[in-house]
Structure formats: structure tokens, C-alpha cells
Amino acid sequence: MSGEGTRLIMGPFNRVEGDLEVRLDTSLDTVVSAEVSSPLYRGFERMLVGKPVHDALVYAPRICGICSVSQSVAAARALAKLSPAALPEAGAHAVNLVHAVENLADHFTHFHLFFMPDFAREVYAAEPWYEGIAARFRAITGSAVREALQARASWMEIMGLLAGKWPHTLSIQPGGSTRAISRPEKVQVLTLIRRFRQYLEATLFGDSLEAVGELASAEALHAWSEGRSSDFAQFLQVARALELDRLGRTRNAHMSFGAYELGTGHLFAQGVWVAGAVQPLETASIAEDVSHAWYAQGPGAKGPLRDAPVPDVQNEDAYSWCKAPRLGGQVVEVGALSRLLVEGHPLALDMARKGGNVTARIVARMLELALVVPAMETWISAIDPEAPFIDHSALAPAGEGAGLTEAARGSLGHWLRADAGRIDHYQIIAPTTWNFSPRDKRGVPGPLEQALEGTPIRPGEEEPVAVQHVVRSFDPCMVCTVH
């Protein structure tokens, strides 16, 4: 980090996937405005063009080693638009289980290894809660790190059983899953899910998942955490002491593409939450603004199925390789909080009534752990090992379509056009592209840039700890952002 006058430049951030730089204009003790930059260009969209269409399942997941299953699901769904295949029920459950393992592992890891260690910084050494938090969550040496990694390793065994390997499985295909499972393997998967449930209930929550999932208001959450010593309860106690609900506030719309597609819909609904009401999602109104990114601006945004901006380092207004996706021209936030707002969960609605904030984003991730694990128990129980897991119908050589899903960090979309059996066009908008977008042509900042405005700076701080909390509350993944 370097500081000169009222401008601070923070980066790279540790414990973050990929390069991230944040430039802050500050007053004496507050962030006045922020510019968020992703300084590394990768070019997966361009390298996919000209490849056989099935190669999307090989290349696209390599965008990221953390959410590769999400990338596989999005690519498979985009390719499915070229196929008459109907996804078999057993295949849908298998894909949802694999996807849920990855998403929940992300939430679990983010809490223990990325977010909580910031409270073990020396800047908090005088706080009454410091010693206990530092011993439990200090990076690398904290007791929670060892326990959480053991629980995570056991959890990821499900990936081996259902997907063969992780990251970059090829079991997820446009017509379902290539990995049928036997009855003994069903028992193995259910045993691993129950083992993870036991860890969550004994250590993370100190209560049943159902009891956590039924908490319906911020007041009920506060009462629940009083006198409780679990990891989540400790976070809530620190969050109240530091007033993290006043930090990282945004007042944007929240979007979800819908998570865990089932025959009757999604476990978490698709839609847009605007000022307390859910509206239908109009994907045709999604477009990317590149006025402040290192790309050439075309003659008018037509959306990711038609636009393919090319790099242009001569753009004098640019400060990031991240484009600025907008929905109907408006900034939207994505992620676990957005999913639960669209779904209408009462706790999320209550916690976000004054806008998105650091506490609400972390609580939403924990709430998803409590809500999705019981759903997974239902999915694995519903699988008939004798039923088909995949429809092998051939893909049409030409066509177009979008594959939409929800990664742990939020809405993920792949848009493709195919011609003569090869990829003619491929565009990806990842969750962090939405949340970490630069300004658009109207000068409107992206969600994180807005969230950082007004962030307090302690006297003498060269790495403002509150800025770290705000940035990490979005769980940045920059390799996905500029894929």
C-alpha cells in the first residue's frame, strides 16, 4: 500500500483469489470515493472462439479453481440450448449436489480463512473480545483453521464420489451427469452430508440447522446469539461491537439467476429485488458498459449474446480490466444476500431494510449453510440409482443460448453462439464482475465502490481495517472477474 496526500492505494490484498487494487480518495478519517481495479487481463472469452462447442466444458471451468463447478454448470446450460435433451431427475439432483458442495465449501472457507482472521489484527488488541477471537481465528495458527480444514476435507469427499475430481470435473454435461451412483454410494454421500451437518451444528452454530434457518429477524438473531459460544455467535457479538451493519452499505437492486434448478423451479428463486419488492428478471436488459475499462466501446450495447468488446489499453478513462455489467442500465448487487432477498427470507429482508451491509452479507452466507444442507439430504434420498442420469442427445451444430446459474459469490452467466459445430461467440459475466465493476458511462460507481464510500479510517492507519472488512464481505475473486 502507498499513501500520498488524500489518495491511498491498497493492493494486492492477501487471502484473495487474483489481483485486486483499490484506490481511495479520503478526508481526514473517511473514504470519500473509491475506484476498484482488476489489473490482470486473461482472455478466456477470446480463446474459446473457434473451438469445437464441447470444448467449452473443458476451457470455461478453468477460469477459476474455486468455482469451477459453477462455471461447468453455466457452460453446460448454455450448450443445452443447442440440444433437445431433457435433463433426467436423477441427473438434476446429482448436478445440484455437486454444485451445492462447492458453493457451501466456499461459504465455509470464506468465513474461517478469509473473513474472520481480520479480527485477529493487532489494531483490535485492546478490544475485550480480542484474545478469544485471535486464538480461534488467527490466520494459519488459529484453532478454528485446523478444525475447519478437517471438516472441509471430509465434505469435499462428496465431490470425488459424484464428480470424479475437483476442480474441473467433466461429469457435468448439457444432458445431465455422466456419473451415475450406486445404492452403497448413496449411503456414503448421505453419511458425509450428515457428518458436515454435525460439525456445523456442534461448532459453527451450536444449534440445529433448522433452528438457524428459521430465525426471522435481526432481533431474533441477536437474542439467539446471546450467551452462545459457537463460531457464528462469536462473529455476531464482534459485529455488534464494531457496528458492522453500518459498514459497507449499498442501496442497489439485488439480482439472482436462481439457484439449484429443480423440476418445479429453483431452491432459491430467480428475480430482482428492488426497494423491498421482487420483480421478474429480464435477462435481455443485461449489457456491459466499458467506458471505464480497457476495452473499445462499440456503437451501442446489445447485450452479452451480441457484444464482444476487444481490449483497448488506449482508453484514457479506464482504470480496470473489469467491465461494468448493468441491468436495464442500473447497478445491481449479487451474492448470498441477494439470493435470500429475492427468495424472500425474512431474516435477510429484515437485516437489509436499510441497505446491504457487511453483517448482512456474512449472515446470508451462514444462513445458506443452514438452509442448503437439509435440502441436499432430500436430494440424495430422492435419487433412484436405476434411473438415467443423462440424456446423450447430440448438440445442433448452430444456435445460440445463455447458461445462467448462481455461484457462491452470485449470478454467473455464459452466453454463446455456435456455427458449424464451433464456438462463434462466447461471453461470460461472473459475480465479481457485477460487484467489483468500475464506473459506467454515467459515472455511477459499481457496488463495492459505493460500499466503500464513507468507510472510517482510524488515525495513522495505512491499511484501513474497515476497508478490508467491506472488501471481504463481497468475497472477491478477481480471476473470475476478468476471465
Image (spheres, grey):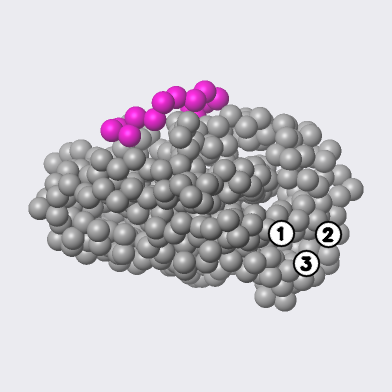
- Label 3 vs 2, first from the N-terminus: 2
Q: CA distance from mark 2 to mark 1?
A: 30 Å
The stretch in magenta equals 273-285
Residue 87 on the magenta segment: no
Is disc 3 in contact with disc 1, using a CB cutoff of under 8 Å? no
What element does badge 1 sit on?
A: helix
Asked whether, in this view, residue 74 is left or right of residue 188, the answer is left
Q: Which mark is residue 364?
A: none
Pair 2/1: label in front:
1
What element does badge 3 sit on?
A: helix
Find disc 2 in the rendering and name its residue: 129
Residue 43 rendering spot, x and y as whole percentages: 26, 63
Res 353 visible: yes
Asked whether, in this view, residue 412 is left or right of residue 396, the answer is right
Q: CA distance from mark 3 to mark 1?
A: 22 Å
Residue 476 rendering spot, x and y as whole percentages: 49, 58
What element does badge 2 sit on?
A: loop
Pair 3/1: label in front:
1
Around disc 2, counting alpha carbons within 10 Å, would you say few (fewer than 14), some (14 to 19), or many (20 or more)? some
- Label 2 vs 1, first from the N-terminus: 2
Residue 98 rendering spot, x and y as whole percentages: 51, 55
Q: Quadrant of the C terminus?
A: bottom left
Find disc 1 in the rendering and name its residue: 195
Residue 217 rendering spot, x and y as whole percentages: 73, 32
Find disc 3 in the rendering and name its residue: 136
